[in-house]
Image (tube, grey):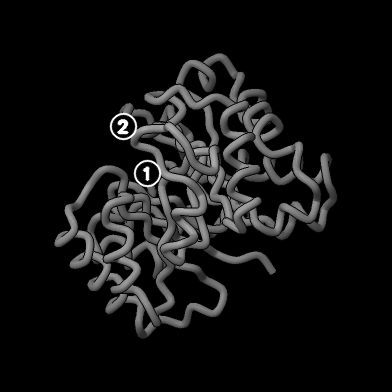
Amino acid sequence: MRKQIVAGNWKMNKNVQESTQLANEIVAEVKGLNLDNTRVIITPTFVNISEVVKVTKGSPVEVAAQNMHQAKSGAFTGEISAEMLTSLGLKSVILGHSERREYFGETDAILAEKVDAALANGLEIIFCFGEVLEDRKSDNHFKVVESQIKNGLFHLSADAWKNIVLAYEPVWAIGTGETASPEQAQEMHAFIRKIVADKYNADIAENVSILYGGSVNPGNAKEIFSKKDVDGGLIGGAALNADDFFGIVNAF
């Protein structure tokens, strides 16, 4: 049975004091929940990871990274390697977020290298992908999503997929005034599961968790998460408030 996951992407927000405070609040709020089939993940900035790891130790709240470099080490000023993340006790990393693709020029080829480096270091990957507004309006969204998944992940062996979580980001519906419906989310998630099944097999497709990253909040989470192929959310703004985040975790 695939896991339900709520992953909070803190992006470039919160200093160390604010990060540890938010982590403490989230740990306290999820303490009494039955999380048998639900994972709760938070992703502070690199500089705050070690302090947040201390706060979450012994709790069900997991800490992941927002990104990493594909090289093991070297002259890559400002970058962080997979080994640096695992040395902090991290087990998961987000790769391919729409902001990384758009603002930092991360291509499918670069992301395939990052995927390989993460897996080589035993990291689970939350792999992001999704179409922009022009793709959606030109009815090209399925092709774009399929291409991003194929180029980033379809070189992997079937066995590697036990360390893959997928996260669909309808970029066109994030901060644009456009709205993606729960039905549109389900339609895309079902398509994603089908192309994984076609490439590998039905077992892998049925066991991979597919998260929705389209402005999930406490008000819409229950309806979105009720959809058959939506296994949780990659949460942005609502992850920066403990009560909002808890409301989403509690929506299953």
Q: Secondary structure at mark 2?
A: loop
Disc 2 residue crowd, few under 14, some 14–19, many 20+, Cα 10 Å: few
Quarter holding residue 194: top right
Residue 119 x/y as whole percent: 64, 51
Q: CA distance from mark 2 to mark 1?
A: 8 Å
Comparing 137 with 66, the one in front is 66
Q: Quadrant of the N terminus?
A: bottom right
Give the mark nearer the N terminus: 2 vs 1. Answer: 2
Marks 2,1: beta carbons within 8 A: yes
Q: Quadrant of residue 218?
A: bottom left
How many C-alpha atoms fall within 10 Å of the one at disc 1: few (<14), some, or many (≥20)?
Answer: many
Asked whether residue 14 is in view, the answer is: yes
Residue at 48%, 16% in the rendered image: 134
* Left or right of 90, for residue 127: right
Q: Residue furthest front?
A: 74
**Left or right: 93 in relation to 51:** right
Q: Which three-letter amino acid code belongs to the residue tagged 1?
A: Ser
Residue 135 quadrant: top right
Task: Give x and y (percent) for residue 226.
Answer: 53, 59
73 and 56: which is toward the camera: 73
Residue type indicated by callout 2: Gly
The residue labelled by disc 2 is 175
Q: How many marks?
A: 2
- Residue at 44 percent of width and 43 percent of height: 67
Point out which mark residue 215 bears: 1
Give the x, y percent position of residue 171.
44, 31
Q: Residue furthest left?
A: 17
In the image, taking residue 52 as reference, residue 80 lies left or right, namely right
Q: Is residue 143 left or right of residue 244?
A: right
Which residue lies at the image location 68% right of the left edge and 41% below the top edge?
A: 192
Image point (61%, 42%), residue name: 115
